[in-house]
């Protein structure tokens, strides 16, 4: 069963790409400089792909390029050029939303593998039939489907020889992927053009002056459904997060890698009658529901309402930006020139990530702690900070400070990522021939053989 379950991880930049490799992804999806539904991500350049592709391919990791925005007629040619550049660099598949682009890629590159993007909101049999006719080999099923519906569609997809792809971790949208125009109407930033500014996550001020986020959903975490999803094999289990950092990608990918491997081992053990193995299998089954470190990296709280088939009020996260943040005290003083923050009744340390809000929950800023010390004989922590992102007002006395602490030193991960290189693949060559006959040569590497003759 293990060869039929793909772990598909995101890469919003080259560092996250390497993190996915290091953590054990089977495939990585990413965007380039154009036509990606995540223009806010750093994304990967063609030049970087030249270096990154061998790191993945020599480990047997597949690469999927997201060209998943809707295109104008004038952009089709540029999209085809980008597709050609990606295929030349050993990208395995193109993720597409635009049906016109699908047809053009299929005509221009008949052998290219095409995947249907989440932006297509695939949720019925008629869509599956159309996608099969368009030559799609893998389709992302809508995030709003229940586990029973996923199992049903996965079985139907086998008749078309199409692999289902399911998001198992990451953000939920308040609307259906590819069908939301809230960002377009409010800010002129189109989600289907990759420019969604996520107004559903923003705060709205009530008449009594409180700030709330009434449209913000908790995050998807399908960890408890891992066994059921793996039973739908062949299947691709996809992690959302092309705007997330390398630590997030590494942590989530590693946890899912371990879970899938454990399930695969249980599947093997189920065919064994040995009592010792059976006891081990029973013990391992208890561990399948543990998410380990998933709640230690960015999340808005977790929910499985769609997978359960019954959305509830608890699906909404009440404006909580990140469930990993904890109260770290109150602003006592801030020097804007020196970037010195003094915090009362709390403690922060180097590398902590800070969130500062007003007492009525208005967002002020995010920041990173560069250094800190506790002032002698006081309850004050003095910290040198670096503001990250937009400053939405002034940092003032009395504001509330929240913190999240990295699960390990980011420098340790970065050092491991810097050292990652393509691996050597053993190549065997067999040459044979007879007098007055052409020489025959067989090249064999990683169970792939190529035969040539003079």
Image (cartoon, grey):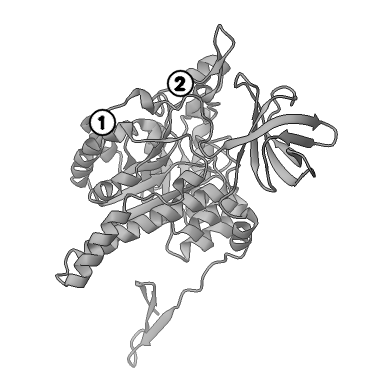
Judge from the rendering whether residue 404 lies leftward or rightward of residue 259; answer left or right: right
Q: Residue furthest front?
A: 377
Q: From mark 2 to mark 1, how far is it between C-alphas?
A: 19 Å
- For the question of whether residue 304 can be seen, the reply is yes
> What kind of element bears circle 1?
loop
From the image, tell me which residue sits under label 2.
215
From the image, tell me which residue sits under label 1.
309
Query: Relative to 388, is 446 above or below?
Result: below
Q: Quadrant of residue 174?
A: top left
Rendered location of residue 128, percent (x, y): 25, 36
Residue name at image x 34 percent, y 88 percent = 433
- For the question of whether residue 107 can be seen, the reply is no
Residue name at image x 41 percent, y 38 percent = 96
Q: Nearer the viewer, residue 86 or 326?
A: 326
Rendered location of residue 127, percent (x, y): 26, 32
Residue name at image x 48 percent, y 30 percent = 71
Q: Nearer the viewer, residue 91 or 202?
A: 202
Tell me which numbered mark, 2 or 1, is placed earlier along the sequence.
2
């Amino acid at each position: 069963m293990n060869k039929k379950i793909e772990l598909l991880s995101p890469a919003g930049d080259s560092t996250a790409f390497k993190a996915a490799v290091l953590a054990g992804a089977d495939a990585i999806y990413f965007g380039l400089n154009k036509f990606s539904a995540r223009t806010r991500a750093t994304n990967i350049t063609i030049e970087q792909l030249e270096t990154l592709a061998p790191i993945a391919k020599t480990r047997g990791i597949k690469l999927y390029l997201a060209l998943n925005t809707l295109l104008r007629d004038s952009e089709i040619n540029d999209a085809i050029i980008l597709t050609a550049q990606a295929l030349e660099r050993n990208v395995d598949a193109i993720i597409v939303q635009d049906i016109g682009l699908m047809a053009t890629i299929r005509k221009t590159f008949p052998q290219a593998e095409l995947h249907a993007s989440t932006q297509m909101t695939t949720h019925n049999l008629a869509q599956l039939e159309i996608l099969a006719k368009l030559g799609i080999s893998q389709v992302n099923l809508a995030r709003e489907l229940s586990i029973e519906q996923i199992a049903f569609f996965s079985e139907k997809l086998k008749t078309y020889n199409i692999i289902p792809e399911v998001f198992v971790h990451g953000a939920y949208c308040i609307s259906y992927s590819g069908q939301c125009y809230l960002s377009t109407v409010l800010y002129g930033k189109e989600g289907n053009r990759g420019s969604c500014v996520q107004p559903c996550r923003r705060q709205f001020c009530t008449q009594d002056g409180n700030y709330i986020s009434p449209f913000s959903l908790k995050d998807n975490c399908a960890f408890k459904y891992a066994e059921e999803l793996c039973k739908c094999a062949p299947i691709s289990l996809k992690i959302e997060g092309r705007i997330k950092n390398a630590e997030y990608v590494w942590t989530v990918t590693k946890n899912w890698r371990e879970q899938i491997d454990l399930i695969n081992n249980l599947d093997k053990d189920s065919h064994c009658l040995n009592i010792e193995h059976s006891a081990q299998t029973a013990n391992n089954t208890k561990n399948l529901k543990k998410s380990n470190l998933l709640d230690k990296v960015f999340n808005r709280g977790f929910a499985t309402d769609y997978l359960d088939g019954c959305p509830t009020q608890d699906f909404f996260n009440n404006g909580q930006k990140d469930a990993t943040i904890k109260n770290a005290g109150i602003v006592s003083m801030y020097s804007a020139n020196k970037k010195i923050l003094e915090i009362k009744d709390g403690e922060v340390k180097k590398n902590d990530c800070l969130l500062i809000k007003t007492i009525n929950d208005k967002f002020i800023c995010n920041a990173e702690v560069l250094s800190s010390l506790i002032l002698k004989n006081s309850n004050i922590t003095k910290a040198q900070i670096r503001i990250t992102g937009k400053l939405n007002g002034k940092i003032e006395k009395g504001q509330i400070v929240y913190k999240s602490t990295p699960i390990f030193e980011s420098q340790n991960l970065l050092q491991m990522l810097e050292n990652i290189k393509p691996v050597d693949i053993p190549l065997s060559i067999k040459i044979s021939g007879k007098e007055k006959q052409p020489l025959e040569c067989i090249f064999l590497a990683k169970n792939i053989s190529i035969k040539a003759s003079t």
